[in-house]
């Protein structure tokens, strides 16, 4: 499979007053299409920072990040927003669904930016909800769903624009064992059968085991597992 | 789902807060519109066609000082003067109570020349001219007190040490204030023991063009006499009554400014709170592709929707009230007119829109400045 993500000599330094904290220290990495990459490491190791830079929601201090042949580090804010909408699906630890919107409407949100007719949006949303096994919960509000179901809705929202890349930051951190397994299996299926590239940050070795490759970060440096 | 639907759902997500926000805007703008309308009624005397031709002449010392009746022939000789008539405010009580209608002593035979807009049957007008003790009554006052032609009404003097026993011989309509009672100046003069004075003189100019010259001439004619006068246009004369209230424009203007400023602070605070609670959601929206300008539009639309809805309820409610309730009756005749003009309504809506915009600025800037990563960490 061709590489979908290429990172070269990437560094990220946070400045807090006069103190500098190195979150990522000259990292180079490639991630192939349909790979399910688990990013592991202790708190503060820089794994979430790396995920955010790949997903285009944070910028490195130096180095290069190319995703699907696009130098995301060189895009301006507006272009980056468009790029994220079309190329990246996000799954967060705390689900981050909009509480006043139904499951259907939450999944529909990214499509509102795509100038699609409502019938097409409806078709895509129902397909995405069906993929995560929640087509029958389309009209439910997030508070009417379990944590596992909420996370599956979040995965449907990440999938609905058919992005090549799905980034998941501790997607099972707030879930019970069974729900966590369900979510991980969905992510694994997306990687294996839909050829999505999944990059997942996790503390949990059992969750990491679902990945096709594990990477450890320690003090901002890569350590091969 | 549409973008508009998304905005409405967000605006109404905390229904109690949304309702209180709308109410705070509506109550404030109701007060604002009411105050502006009151100020307009107090400071803009009604004007009719004849107003541009009418000149009021009063004592230069004080409006309460009477003028000698002997001034009449001198005024009549001034070029451009078409008619002169005394107009003496009696200020009496009726049926032993303070009343909301004025009573004036005039020359009936000159009345039509000065206040030609009054509509009264010819036979009633003739009857008034012929009977020195008679009066004509505005239709509103007649209705309020159940007066009809042939009735007698006694006005008990408060300024003047006499009472007037008047016979109602006519009812008139068609003026901007159909409440006044008009009687013979000569009857008042007689009741006061040949008083020989009048309250004010009212002049009708031959044309609007000569009115300024008449004013100058009248002022000059009595400048070095024992009774200097101040001649002025009807509007200026009316405004001198308003000035007795003090600087009411500044007072009401200050209250309006405080109302608007307080409303601005409340709205800005409410919007800031509402957005602060959703920082992480807005960060998620940014992450999935919404740009800063789209988020700003969401916040602006939400803020505008709440404030404009408040204006619809508040300013619209005031307009509805003014058009459905008899304000004259409700205020005991104090405000015979209460016109919520399109200009005042427009101003209220413009203020609501401005408040909507200003209230959305701080949260929009905060959202724009916050990166996706910072936003996602907000409530973590």
Image (cartoon, rainbow, N blue to C red):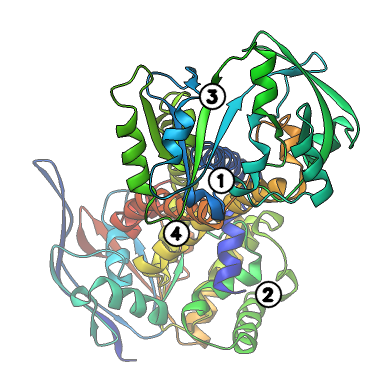
Q: Which residue is mark 1?
A: B46
- Which chain letter matches label 3? B
Q: Which mark is residue B300?
A: 4
Q: Which residue is mark 3?
A: B199
Mark 2: few/some/many CA within 10 Å (<14, 14-19, 20+)? some
**Left or right side of A102 for B300:** left
The alpha-carbon separation of the residues under discs 4 and 1 comes to 41 Å
Q: Nearer the viewer, mark 3 or mark 2?
A: 3
- Asked whether disc 3 touches disc 2, contact meaning CB atoms under 8 Å apart, the reply is no
Q: Quadrant of the N terminus of chain B?
A: bottom right
Mark 3: few/some/many CA within 10 Å (<14, 14-19, 20+)? many
Asked if badge 4 and badge 2 are on a common chain, one would say no
Residue found 64% across the figure and 27% down from its top? B185
Q: Which mark is residue A133?
A: 2
Disc nearer the start of the sequence (3/4): 3
Disc nearer the start of the sequence (4/1): 1
Asked if badge 3 and badge 2 are on a common chain, one would say no
Q: Who is closer to the viewer here, A50 or B369?
A: B369
The alpha-carbon separation of the residues under discs 3 and 4 comes to 60 Å
The alpha-carbon separation of the residues under discs 3 and 2 comes to 92 Å
Residue A154 vertical placement versus A219 (above, below):
below
Tell me where residue B114 appears, x and y as whole percent. 58, 45
- Which chain letter matches label 2? A
Q: Who is closer to the viewer here, B286 or B342?
A: B342
Mark 4: few/some/many CA within 10 Å (<14, 14-19, 20+)? many
The alpha-carbon separation of the residues under discs 4 and 2 comes to 37 Å
Disc nearer the start of the sequence (3/1): 1
- Asked whether disc 3 touches disc 1, contact meaning CB atoms under 8 Å apart, the reply is no
- The answer to whether any part of residue B102 appears in the image is no
């Amino acid at each position: 499979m061709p590489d979908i993500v290429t990172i070269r000599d990437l560094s990220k330094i946070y400045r807090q007053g006069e103190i500098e904290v190195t979150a990522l220290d000259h990292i180079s990495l490639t991630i192939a299409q349909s790979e399910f990459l688990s990013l592991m490491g202790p708190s503060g190791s820089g794994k979430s920072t790396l995920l955010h830079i790949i997903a285009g929601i944070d910028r490195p201090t130096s180095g290069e990040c190319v995703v699907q042949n696009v130098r995301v580090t060189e895009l301006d804010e507006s272009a980056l927003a468009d790029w994220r909408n079309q190329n990246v699906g996000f799954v967060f630890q705390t689900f981050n669904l909009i509480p006043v919107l139904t499951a259907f409407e939450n999944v529909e949100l990214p499509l509102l930016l795509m100038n699609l007719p409502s019938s097409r949006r409806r078709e895509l949303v129902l397909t995405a909800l069906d993929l995560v096994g929640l087509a029958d919960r389309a009209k439910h509000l997030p508070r009417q769903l379990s944590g596992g179901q909420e996370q599956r809705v979040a995965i449907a929202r990440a999938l609905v624009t058919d992005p090549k890349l799905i980034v998941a930051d501790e997607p099972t951190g707030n879930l019970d064992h069974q729900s966590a397994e369900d979510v991980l299996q969905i992510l694994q299926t997306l990687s294996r059968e839909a050829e999505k590239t999944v990059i997942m940050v996790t503390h949990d070795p059992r969750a990491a085991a679902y990945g096709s490759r594990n990477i450890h970060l320690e003090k901002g440096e890569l350590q091969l597992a | 789902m549409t973008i508009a639907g998304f905005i409405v759902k967000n605006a109404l997500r905390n229904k109690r807060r949304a309702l209180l926000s709308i109410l705070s805007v509506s109550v404030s703008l109701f007060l604002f519109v009411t105050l502006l309308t009151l100020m307009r009624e107090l400071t803009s005397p009604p004007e009719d066609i004849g107003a541009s031709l009418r000149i009021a002449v009063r004592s230069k010392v004080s409006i309460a000082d009477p003028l000698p009746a002997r001034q009449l022939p001198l005024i009549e000789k001034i070029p451009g003067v078409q008619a002169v008539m005394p107009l003496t405010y009696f200020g009496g009580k009726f049926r032993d109570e303070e009343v909301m209608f004025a009573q004036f002593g005039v020359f009936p035979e000159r009345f039509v020349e000065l206040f030609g807009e009054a509509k009264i049957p010819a036979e009633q007008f003739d009857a008034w001219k012929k009977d020195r003790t008679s009066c004509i009554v505005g239709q509103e006052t007649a209705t309020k007190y159940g007066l009809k032609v042939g009735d007698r009404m006694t006005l008990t003097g408060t300024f003047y040490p006499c009472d007037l026993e008047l016979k109602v011989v006519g009812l008139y309509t068609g003026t901007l204030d159909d409440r006044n009672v008009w009687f013979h100046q000569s009857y008042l003069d007689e009741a006061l023991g040949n008083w020989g004075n009048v309250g004010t003189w009212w002049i009708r100019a031959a044309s609007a063009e000569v009115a300024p010259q008449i004013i100058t001439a009248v002022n000059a004619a009595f400048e070095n006499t024992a009774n200097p006068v101040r001649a002025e246009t009807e509007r200026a004369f009316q405004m001198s009554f308003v000035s007795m209230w003090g600087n009411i424009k500044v007072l009401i203007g200050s209250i309006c400014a405080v109302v608007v400023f307080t409303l601005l602070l409340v709205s800005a605070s409410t919007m800031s709170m509402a957005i602060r609670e959703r920082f992480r959601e807005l960060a998620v929206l940014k992450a999935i592709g919404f740009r800063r300008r789209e988020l700003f539009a969401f916040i602006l639309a939400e803020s505008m929707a709440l404030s404009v809805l408040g204006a619809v309820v508040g300013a619209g409610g005031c307009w509805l009230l003014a058009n459905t309730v008899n304000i004259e009756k409700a205020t005991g005749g104090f405000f015979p007119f209460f016109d919520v003009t399109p200009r005042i309504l427009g101003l209220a809506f413009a203020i609501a829109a401005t408040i909507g915009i200003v209230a959305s600025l701080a949260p929009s800037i905060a959202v724009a400045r916050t990166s996706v990563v910072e936003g996602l960490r907000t409530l973590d």
